[in-house]
Amino acid sequence: MELDTGVTAWMLVSASLVLLMTPGLALFYGGMTRSKSVLNMMMMSFGAMGVIGVLYVLWGWSMSYGSQSIGGIFANPFEMFGLAGAIYDEGGEFIVDGGLPVVVDVGFQVTFAIITTALISGALAERVKFGTWMVFTGLWVTLAYFPMAHMVWGGGLLSGDGPFASIAEPVDFAGGTVVHINAGVAALVLALIVGRRKGFGTEAIKPHNLPFVMLGAALLWFGWFGFNAGSAYGADGMAGLAWVNTTTAAAAAILGWLVVEKLRDGHATSLGAASGIVAGLVAITPAAGSLSPVGSIVLGLLAGALCALAVGLKYKLGYDDSLDVVGVHLVGGLVGTVMIGVLATDGGLLYGGGPALLAVQVIIAAVAMLLSGVVTAVIALALKATMGWRVDEATEVGGIDLVVHGESGYEGLSSGRISTEGRLGTQARDVNSEAKA
């Protein structure tokens, strides 16, 4: 097939934008931790880039998009091991599919695998061994992410070629199930298995650098255009629709989150605005190509409000999802995936489509949760029994940065001088309320 240079250029730009999201996430998460652990938090994102960037070339692409599907769950990891047969044809020419060299698609897809796994780290802030995290990233991306990508986008169980398509064709434009539900469930399972930080529920634990958080959110928003608009696989009207819907949903989610904060707590915070951006981006990810811009406003407002409410659940239920991966990514991913069945202009309930699309969206969300939860639990428990997850108490209290990495994020800080600041706003009030109760 003839090379389309316009499509190729657009996808190279999109891949680069998505890759930028992981350093953006590092800033977002790093600012939300205490100053004594900022480098460790950021290193968890960079570590995921290192591990997955290698594994994707070796077997990730083959497991995700190979032609030899195994039960519709994953493809043969050895079919294109090391990208053999994925780059050049028998004549030595680049393989082109839909006007796009396959090697460019490999570059685009590896960035999704990296950011998805890095998202999980937010549930583990300030208390886990860096080595265990690095091993986890390799195991989880292999056993959870690559299979999920195959099931949804590679013609597997949860795709339009799978058994649920007899109800209605499942929709996941850019990763509601593959990315956000997958990572959100993994974060919840790990938070439960690894346990709480010392002081969780009894002392406030708030971000040490809110400008970092806001800058990270801005970089995530910018990179998300590659995530969503790039998933149109062309510089065309669908990419434009995805771009507009992405911007609109994120903007509306800021408003939804801030209204909840103002009514509940009396303040509209910068942390809330940054979190609202991410909540809206998460929700629109699976729906970016299916909704109208007006529908994206509805979805964004709903996601912002529900995620703002959901982040407080960890104090009521007692799990330490440190940086709200569950409240933002799991809840936002579920909202976006399920609401496609209501708001999609083609097949949604509000557009006279009947219940079929809504039913299949609920089913694929539930199956994704189940599969991710089981796989993550097995990996997490195996690592707990072998390598162990937790750093020792002295390291956790003093700060992981100096002990594990031999560095400090800020000149002049030492483990004995770093404050034990707590988390901001509504969550701090929730902690105090819980402590008094």
Image (spheres, rainbow, N blue to C red):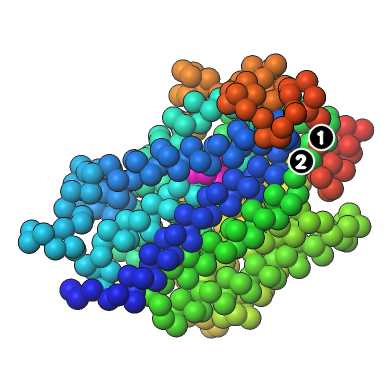
Question: Count the marks: how many?
Answer: 2
The residue positioned 62% from the left and 28% from the top of the image is: 407
Callout 2–callout 1 Cβ contact below 8 Å: yes
Q: Residue at x 84, y 60 (%)?
A: 268
Image vertical order of residue 203 relative to residue 178, above or below: above
Q: Write down the region rendered in magenta.
A: 117-121
Q: Where, by quadrant of the figure, is residue 1 drawn?
A: bottom left
SS at badge 1: loop
Amino acid of disc 2: His
Residue 145, visible in the rendered structure: yes
Q: Is residue 403 magenta?
A: no
- Look at the picture and state if 195 lies above or below 6: above
Q: Quadrant of the C terminus?
A: top right
Residue at label 2? 208
Tell me if I can see residue 290 in this picture. no
Which residue is identified by label 1?
421
Asked whether residue 119 is drawn in magenta, I would say yes
Q: Amino acid at mark 1?
A: Glu
218 vs 320: above or below: below
Work out whether residue 343 or residue 217 is closer to the camera in this orientation and state it.
217
Identified at 57% across, 75% down, the residue is: 245
> Seen from this angle, which residue lies furthest front?
411
Give percent across and percent down for residue 367: 46, 51
Q: CA distance from mark 2 to mark 1?
A: 7 Å
Compared across the picture, whether 367 is left or right of 191 comes to left
